[in-house]
Amino acid sequence: MRRPLILAGFVLVGCSTGQATLSSDTFSSLDGNDDETTGDGDPGDGDGDGDGDPGDGDGDGDGDGDPGDGDGDTGDGDGDGDGDVCERYLYRHNLTNDTWETQPLDLVWTGPNAPPCSVEPLATSYLEVWDQLLVWGVNGMYYRRIGGTWQSPEPIADRWPIIADVEIDSVAYTPPINGSSSCNLIFTAVPNAYIYQVFEDGGTNYDQTVGMMDEPPPGPPQSSTARRWSLVLADPELLGQADWSVQWAGFEDGKVYRFNGAFDWSNWPASQSPVLSGAPRGLDPSTLEAGYGDYGLNRAYLIGL
């Protein structure tokens, strides 16, 4: 028998034929990465909060730290150079004290190489161990921020050829554990999951594609219902404890599901879920597009309209 590969929210079980199915017996390698660099002043930020502090990616994307920057064109908020105001937001939920902050995305993702605010993020992942934020855009481009600096964007096909023509729903990750030098990224696109290894230098290695299986209630029907977004909070040093890793995921069935390291599923109607508790009035769960988590700060980050 092939040894199960432990992944975020899933366990891959295969046999010698190479066939595999994906189910959620194990949520065991999610690294709660996110000092992040999203421009909210968290450790590792650029800081990109638009307040003009040194290191701000600022608000106009010109990287000069001036308040009110948007993308490189004066007054342009969405990064496409047409002067339109960005209508995409980053929502931060401090899970410790249940407080929220909302910020236009163009004040957070800034600089000449940042993803334009007008581009829908298909998926995002923050690799805390390396202070890297990864973004896959609906425009077919891949963006990577190291510390506070966005690298030159690349076609998704250059590093992630297997998913280049796949409309991915979300991505979850597992941190390096047991001496590994790579994180695992699990992309979902109903009915399949696509597994990649990613390394600190940005190198990638395709592992396998597996079919997802529906979970018995209270788990999700993940082989037939897409995730709108997912985020992970995890600390590999706590491996073995029930909540050493926790994944939250919003599905198209209108529910938010939680899965932990003890392999327990829970679900709520989206507006009643703890991860969206006390959300600002302008946050519509049905318009959320991507997310990522920060174990160290105990924060959830959600992106949407």
Image (cartoon, rainbow, N blue to C red):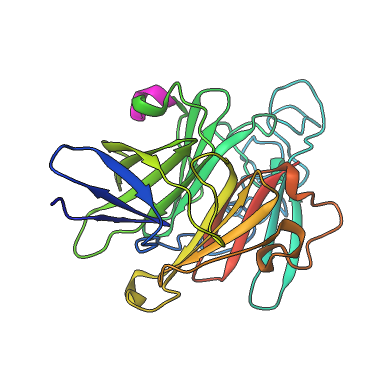
Question: Is 112 placed above or below 245 here?
Answer: above
x then y, percent, for residue 90: 69, 50
Query: Which residue lies at the image location 70% right of the left edge and 29% below the top edge?
Result: 118
Query: Which residue lies at the image location 39% right of the left edge and 45% below the top edge?
Result: 186
Query: Which residue lies at the image location 62% right of the left edge and 40% below the top edge?
Result: 110
In this view, the residue farthest toward the front is 216
> Residue 297 versus residue 28: which sits nearer the camera?
28
Relative side of 120 to 286, left or right: left
Magenta residue span: 156-160
Q: Is residue 73 magenta?
A: no
Quadrant position of residue 27:
bottom left
> Residue 28 versus residue 298: which sits nearer the camera?
28
x then y, percent, for residue 54: 61, 55
> Residue 226 versus residue 121: which sits nearer the camera?
226
Magenta: main secondary structure equals: helix
Relative side of 291 to 11, left or right: right
Question: Is 291 placed above or below 167 here?
Answer: below
- All told, the count of numbered labels is 0
x then y, percent, for residue 266: 57, 66
Q: In the picture, which quadrant includes the C terminus?
A: top right
Relative side of 278 to 302, left or right: right
Question: Is 253 placed above or below 45 here?
Answer: above
Does residue 197 appear in this view? no
